[in-house]
Amino acid sequence: MKQTRIGGQAVIEGVMMRGREMYCMAVRNPQGTLTVEKKAWKGLSSKGIFRLPILRGIASFWDSLVSGTRILMRSAEIAGEGWEDEEPSKLEKFLIDKFGEKVNDILIYVTVIISMAMGIGLFFLLPVLLGSFFSRFVPSWALGIIESFIRIVIFLGYLFAISRMKEIQRVFQYHGAEHKTINCFESEKELTVENVRPCTRLHKRCGTSFLFFVIIISCIVFMFIQTTSVGDRLLLKLCLVPFIAGISYEVIRWAGNSDSPLVAIVSKPGFCLQMLTTAEPDDSQIEAAIAAMKGVLEDEGEQ
Protein backbone atom coordinates (compact mmCIF):
# COMPACT_ATOMS: atom_id res chain seq x y z
CA MET A 1 0.00 0.00 0.00
CA LYS A 2 1.24 3.49 -0.88
CA GLN A 3 2.11 5.81 2.02
CA THR A 4 1.37 9.52 1.82
CA ARG A 5 2.01 12.54 4.04
CA ILE A 6 -1.09 14.31 2.76
CA GLY A 7 -3.48 14.94 5.63
CA GLY A 8 -6.92 16.42 5.81
CA GLN A 9 -9.59 18.10 7.84
CA ALA A 10 -13.36 18.26 7.62
CA VAL A 11 -14.62 21.84 7.40
CA ILE A 12 -18.02 23.50 7.08
CA GLU A 13 -19.66 21.86 4.04
CA GLY A 14 -16.36 20.66 2.68
CA VAL A 15 -12.91 19.13 3.07
CA MET A 16 -9.39 20.52 3.27
CA MET A 17 -6.34 18.50 2.19
CA ARG A 18 -2.85 19.65 3.13
CA GLY A 19 0.47 18.79 1.56
CA ARG A 20 3.99 19.81 2.48
CA GLU A 21 3.79 23.43 1.37
CA MET A 22 0.19 24.11 0.38
CA TYR A 23 -3.38 23.15 1.11
CA CYS A 24 -6.50 22.89 -1.00
CA MET A 25 -10.03 23.37 0.30
CA ALA A 26 -13.21 22.35 -1.53
CA VAL A 27 -16.45 23.71 -0.05
CA ARG A 28 -20.03 23.32 -1.26
CA ASN A 29 -21.43 26.84 -1.70
CA PRO A 30 -25.11 27.89 -1.47
CA GLN A 31 -25.49 27.47 -5.25
CA GLY A 32 -24.65 23.77 -4.85
CA THR A 33 -21.31 23.91 -6.69
CA LEU A 34 -17.84 23.43 -5.25
CA THR A 35 -15.66 26.41 -4.46
CA VAL A 36 -12.02 25.26 -4.57
CA GLU A 37 -9.30 27.39 -3.00
CA LYS A 38 -5.56 26.75 -2.80
CA LYS A 39 -3.06 28.51 -0.61
CA ALA A 40 0.63 28.19 0.19
CA TRP A 41 1.27 27.00 3.71
CA LYS A 42 4.45 27.07 5.77
CA GLY A 43 4.11 26.16 9.41
CA LEU A 44 6.32 26.32 12.48
CA SER A 45 7.07 22.60 12.10
CA SER A 46 9.16 23.30 8.98
CA LYS A 47 11.61 25.62 10.76
CA GLY A 48 14.90 24.98 12.57
CA ILE A 49 14.80 22.89 15.72
CA PHE A 50 11.10 22.23 15.26
CA ARG A 51 12.02 19.58 12.70
CA LEU A 52 13.45 17.42 15.48
CA PRO A 53 11.46 14.52 17.00
CA ILE A 54 9.04 15.50 19.78
CA LEU A 55 9.52 19.21 19.01
CA ARG A 56 8.07 18.71 15.54
CA GLY A 57 5.00 17.20 17.19
CA ILE A 58 4.54 20.24 19.42
CA ALA A 59 4.95 22.55 16.41
CA SER A 60 2.61 20.48 14.23
CA PHE A 61 -0.06 20.55 16.93
CA TRP A 62 0.16 24.34 17.10
CA ASP A 63 0.16 24.64 13.30
CA SER A 64 -2.93 22.45 13.07
CA LEU A 65 -4.79 24.57 15.59
CA VAL A 66 -3.95 27.89 13.94
CA SER A 67 -4.32 26.90 10.29
CA GLY A 68 -7.29 24.66 11.08
CA THR A 69 -9.16 27.51 12.75
CA ARG A 70 -8.38 29.87 9.87
CA ILE A 71 -9.56 27.34 7.28
CA LEU A 72 -12.69 26.53 9.28
CA MET A 73 -13.64 30.22 9.41
CA ARG A 74 -13.04 30.60 5.69
CA SER A 75 -15.17 27.55 4.89
CA ALA A 76 -18.02 29.04 6.91
CA GLU A 77 -17.81 32.18 4.78
CA ILE A 78 -17.99 30.19 1.56
CA ALA A 79 -20.77 27.87 2.74
CA GLY A 80 -22.83 30.81 3.97
CA GLU A 81 -22.23 33.32 1.20
CA GLY A 82 -24.32 36.39 1.81
CA TRP A 83 -23.40 36.70 5.49
CA GLU A 84 -20.90 39.38 4.56
CA ASP A 85 -23.82 41.61 3.56
CA GLU A 86 -25.14 41.70 7.12
CA GLU A 87 -24.55 44.81 9.20
CA PRO A 88 -21.52 44.35 11.51
CA SER A 89 -22.21 44.47 15.24
CA LYS A 90 -20.84 47.28 17.42
CA LEU A 91 -18.07 44.98 18.68
CA GLU A 92 -17.12 43.99 15.12
CA LYS A 93 -17.02 47.66 14.06
CA PHE A 94 -14.80 48.51 17.06
CA LEU A 95 -12.36 45.69 16.31
CA ILE A 96 -12.20 46.59 12.60
CA ASP A 97 -11.56 50.26 13.42
CA LYS A 98 -8.94 49.34 16.02
CA PHE A 99 -6.99 46.62 14.21
CA GLY A 100 -7.94 47.00 10.54
CA GLU A 101 -6.99 44.07 8.30
CA LYS A 102 -5.26 42.28 11.19
CA VAL A 103 -8.55 41.71 13.01
CA ASN A 104 -9.07 38.25 11.45
CA ASP A 105 -5.62 37.03 12.52
CA ILE A 106 -6.20 38.36 16.04
CA LEU A 107 -9.56 36.58 16.26
CA ILE A 108 -7.98 33.35 15.04
CA TYR A 109 -5.24 33.39 17.68
CA VAL A 110 -7.71 34.34 20.41
CA THR A 111 -9.95 31.44 19.34
CA VAL A 112 -6.98 29.02 19.37
CA ILE A 113 -5.84 30.16 22.83
CA ILE A 114 -9.35 29.87 24.26
CA SER A 115 -9.78 26.41 22.67
CA MET A 116 -6.45 25.23 24.12
CA ALA A 117 -7.32 26.61 27.55
CA MET A 118 -10.69 24.84 27.51
CA GLY A 119 -9.14 21.56 26.35
CA ILE A 120 -6.38 21.64 28.97
CA GLY A 121 -8.88 22.63 31.66
CA LEU A 122 -11.35 19.88 30.76
CA PHE A 123 -9.00 16.97 30.09
CA PHE A 124 -6.02 17.74 32.33
CA LEU A 125 -6.84 20.16 35.15
CA LEU A 126 -10.40 19.02 35.97
CA PRO A 127 -9.29 15.39 36.60
CA VAL A 128 -6.65 16.70 39.03
CA LEU A 129 -9.23 18.74 40.94
CA LEU A 130 -11.69 15.85 41.06
CA GLY A 131 -8.96 13.39 41.99
CA SER A 132 -7.81 15.62 44.86
CA PHE A 133 -10.89 14.55 46.84
CA PHE A 134 -9.26 11.11 47.17
CA SER A 135 -5.84 12.39 48.30
CA ARG A 136 -6.58 11.72 51.97
CA PHE A 137 -7.53 8.11 51.35
CA VAL A 138 -4.96 6.83 48.83
CA PRO A 139 -1.18 7.13 48.32
CA SER A 140 0.17 9.64 45.77
CA TRP A 141 0.88 6.97 43.13
CA ALA A 142 -2.76 5.87 43.25
CA LEU A 143 -3.92 9.42 42.56
CA GLY A 144 -2.46 9.08 39.06
CA ILE A 145 -4.62 6.02 38.40
CA ILE A 146 -7.77 7.72 39.71
CA GLU A 147 -7.12 10.86 37.66
CA SER A 148 -6.44 8.74 34.57
CA PHE A 149 -9.79 6.97 34.98
CA ILE A 150 -11.57 10.33 35.36
CA ARG A 151 -9.76 11.72 32.31
CA ILE A 152 -10.76 8.77 30.12
CA VAL A 153 -14.39 8.99 31.26
CA ILE A 154 -14.49 12.73 30.47
CA PHE A 155 -12.89 12.17 27.05
CA LEU A 156 -15.26 9.37 26.06
CA GLY A 157 -18.24 11.31 27.38
CA TYR A 158 -17.20 14.37 25.38
CA LEU A 159 -16.86 12.39 22.14
CA PHE A 160 -20.19 10.66 22.68
CA ALA A 161 -21.95 13.95 23.44
CA ILE A 162 -20.75 15.77 20.32
CA SER A 163 -21.46 12.71 18.16
CA ARG A 164 -25.13 13.03 19.16
CA MET A 165 -25.38 16.65 17.98
CA LYS A 166 -27.31 16.95 14.71
CA GLU A 167 -25.37 20.09 13.75
CA ILE A 168 -22.08 18.19 13.80
CA GLN A 169 -23.25 15.15 11.83
CA ARG A 170 -22.54 16.69 8.42
CA VAL A 171 -19.02 17.62 9.55
CA PHE A 172 -18.51 14.00 10.58
CA GLN A 173 -19.72 12.88 7.14
CA TYR A 174 -17.13 15.12 5.49
CA HIS A 175 -14.60 13.68 7.96
CA GLY A 176 -15.51 10.22 6.67
CA ALA A 177 -15.20 11.43 3.06
CA GLU A 178 -11.72 12.77 3.83
CA HIS A 179 -10.56 9.43 5.23
CA LYS A 180 -12.12 7.41 2.43
CA THR A 181 -10.40 9.57 -0.19
CA ILE A 182 -6.97 9.27 1.44
CA ASN A 183 -7.44 5.51 1.82
CA CYS A 184 -8.42 5.25 -1.85
CA PHE A 185 -5.29 7.15 -2.88
CA GLU A 186 -3.08 5.01 -0.65
CA SER A 187 -4.66 1.92 -2.22
CA GLU A 188 -3.40 3.26 -5.59
CA LYS A 189 -6.87 3.45 -7.09
CA GLU A 190 -8.13 6.20 -9.35
CA LEU A 191 -9.81 8.98 -7.38
CA THR A 192 -13.42 8.57 -8.46
CA VAL A 193 -16.60 8.54 -6.40
CA GLU A 194 -17.14 4.89 -7.32
CA ASN A 195 -13.66 3.90 -6.08
CA VAL A 196 -13.75 6.05 -2.94
CA ARG A 197 -17.23 5.01 -1.78
CA PRO A 198 -16.35 1.41 -0.65
CA CYS A 199 -13.13 2.45 1.13
CA THR A 200 -13.03 2.46 4.92
CA ARG A 201 -13.73 5.72 6.72
CA LEU A 202 -11.09 4.90 9.36
CA HIS A 203 -7.46 6.00 9.14
CA LYS A 204 -4.38 5.53 11.33
CA ARG A 205 -3.28 9.19 11.14
CA CYS A 206 -6.65 10.63 12.19
CA GLY A 207 -6.76 13.48 14.70
CA THR A 208 -9.16 11.43 16.83
CA SER A 209 -6.49 8.74 17.19
CA PHE A 210 -3.97 11.47 18.04
CA LEU A 211 -6.21 12.70 20.87
CA PHE A 212 -6.59 9.14 22.10
CA PHE A 213 -2.81 8.75 22.30
CA VAL A 214 -2.53 12.10 24.08
CA ILE A 215 -4.97 10.88 26.73
CA ILE A 216 -3.37 7.45 27.15
CA ILE A 217 0.23 8.70 27.16
CA SER A 218 -0.69 11.43 29.64
CA CYS A 219 -2.21 8.78 31.92
CA ILE A 220 1.06 6.82 31.87
CA VAL A 221 3.31 9.87 32.37
CA PHE A 222 1.19 11.46 35.09
CA MET A 223 1.23 8.31 37.23
CA PHE A 224 4.91 9.06 37.95
CA ILE A 225 4.08 12.42 39.57
CA GLN A 226 4.52 11.60 43.26
CA THR A 227 2.93 14.50 45.14
CA THR A 228 -0.48 15.05 46.70
CA SER A 229 -0.29 18.85 46.46
CA VAL A 230 -3.02 20.01 44.06
CA GLY A 231 -1.02 23.07 43.04
CA ASP A 232 2.12 21.07 42.29
CA ARG A 233 0.20 18.42 40.34
CA LEU A 234 -1.56 21.08 38.26
CA LEU A 235 1.69 22.92 37.49
CA LEU A 236 3.65 19.79 36.60
CA LYS A 237 0.93 18.45 34.34
CA LEU A 238 0.50 21.77 32.60
CA CYS A 239 4.24 21.87 31.85
CA LEU A 240 4.18 18.30 30.50
CA VAL A 241 1.22 18.77 28.13
CA PRO A 242 3.32 20.01 25.12
CA PHE A 243 5.76 17.10 25.42
CA ILE A 244 2.92 14.59 25.68
CA ALA A 245 1.52 16.06 22.44
CA GLY A 246 4.98 15.67 20.88
CA ILE A 247 5.27 12.03 21.92
CA SER A 248 1.74 11.32 20.66
CA TYR A 249 2.65 12.83 17.29
CA GLU A 250 5.63 10.49 17.00
CA VAL A 251 3.39 7.49 17.72
CA ILE A 252 0.89 8.58 15.06
CA ARG A 253 3.73 9.22 12.60
CA TRP A 254 5.15 5.75 13.25
CA ALA A 255 1.73 4.14 12.87
CA GLY A 256 1.10 5.96 9.60
CA ASN A 257 4.33 4.63 8.09
CA SER A 258 3.98 1.00 9.10
CA ASP A 259 1.65 -1.92 8.41
CA SER A 260 3.07 -4.19 11.12
CA PRO A 261 0.79 -6.32 13.35
CA LEU A 262 1.82 -4.17 16.35
CA VAL A 263 0.57 -1.04 14.59
CA ALA A 264 -2.73 -2.77 13.89
CA ILE A 265 -3.11 -3.49 17.61
CA VAL A 266 -2.07 0.02 18.69
CA SER A 267 -4.40 1.65 16.16
CA LYS A 268 -7.47 -0.40 17.11
CA PRO A 269 -8.72 1.81 20.01
CA GLY A 270 -8.38 4.91 17.83
CA PHE A 271 -10.40 3.20 15.10
CA CYS A 272 -13.16 2.49 17.62
CA LEU A 273 -13.29 6.18 18.54
CA GLN A 274 -13.36 7.15 14.88
CA MET A 275 -16.64 5.29 14.61
CA LEU A 276 -18.01 8.18 16.69
CA THR A 277 -16.25 11.04 14.88
CA THR A 278 -16.80 9.89 11.28
CA ALA A 279 -19.98 9.01 9.39
CA GLU A 280 -20.73 7.55 5.98
CA PRO A 281 -20.68 10.40 3.42
CA ASP A 282 -22.92 10.88 0.40
CA ASP A 283 -21.55 11.21 -3.12
CA SER A 284 -21.54 15.03 -3.06
CA GLN A 285 -19.37 14.99 0.07
CA ILE A 286 -16.99 12.48 -1.51
CA GLU A 287 -16.75 14.77 -4.55
CA ALA A 288 -15.58 17.61 -2.27
CA ALA A 289 -12.88 15.42 -0.71
CA ILE A 290 -11.67 14.26 -4.13
CA ALA A 291 -11.51 17.84 -5.42
CA ALA A 292 -9.42 18.87 -2.41
CA MET A 293 -7.07 15.89 -2.81
CA LYS A 294 -6.62 16.47 -6.54
CA GLY A 295 -5.86 20.13 -5.86
CA VAL A 296 -2.89 19.14 -3.68
CA LEU A 297 -1.71 16.46 -6.12
CA GLU A 298 -1.77 18.92 -9.02
CA ASP A 299 0.68 21.21 -7.23
CA GLU A 300 2.82 18.80 -5.23
CA GLY A 301 2.45 15.46 -7.01
CA GLU A 302 2.20 12.12 -5.25
CA GLN A 303 3.72 12.31 -1.78
Image: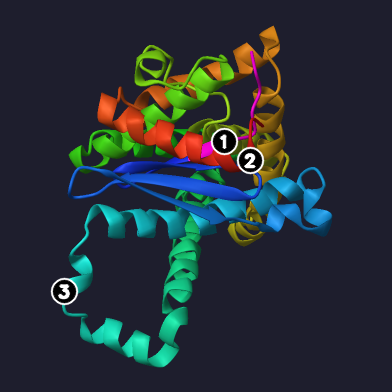
> Compared to 37, does 181 lie above or below?
above
Residue 97: image x %, image y %? 36, 92
Q: Which of marks 3 and 2 is in front?
A: 2
Number of labels in the image equals 3
Describe residue 195's horizontal placement relative to residue 283 as left or right: right
Is residue 141 visible in the rendered image? The answer is no
Judging depth in this view, the residue of 55 and 192 nearest the camera is 192
Is residue 49 visible in the rendered image? The answer is yes
Q: How far apart are marks 3 and 2 (CA)?
A: 38 Å
Q: Residues within 10 Å of mark 3 (few under 14, many from 20)?
A: few
Split into 4 quadrants, where in the image is the N terminus? top right
Residue 189: image x %, image y %? 51, 14
Magenta span main SS: loop
Q: How crowded is mark 1: few (under 14 residues within 10 Å), some or many (20 or more)?
A: some
Residue type at the position of mark 3: Glu
Residue 247: image x %, image y %? 71, 39
Q: Is mark 1 on a helix, strand or loop?
A: helix
Q: Distance between the residues labelled 2 and 1?
A: 5 Å
Judging depth in this view, the residue of 148 and 134 nearest the camera is 148
Q: Quadrant location of residue 41?
A: bottom right
Residue type at the position of mark 2: Glu
Q: Name the residue under label 2.
A: 300
Residue type at the position of mark 1: Leu
> Compared to 126, does 192 lie above or below?
above
Q: Mark 1 points at which residue?
A: 297
Residue 132: image x %, image y %? 52, 49
The question of residue 116 being in magenta is answered with: no
Q: Nearer the viewer, mark 3 or mark 1?
A: 1
Q: Quadrant location of residue 78?
A: bottom left
- Residue span colored magenta: 1-8
Q: Mark 3 points at which residue?
A: 86
Label 2–label 1 contact, CB within 8 A: yes
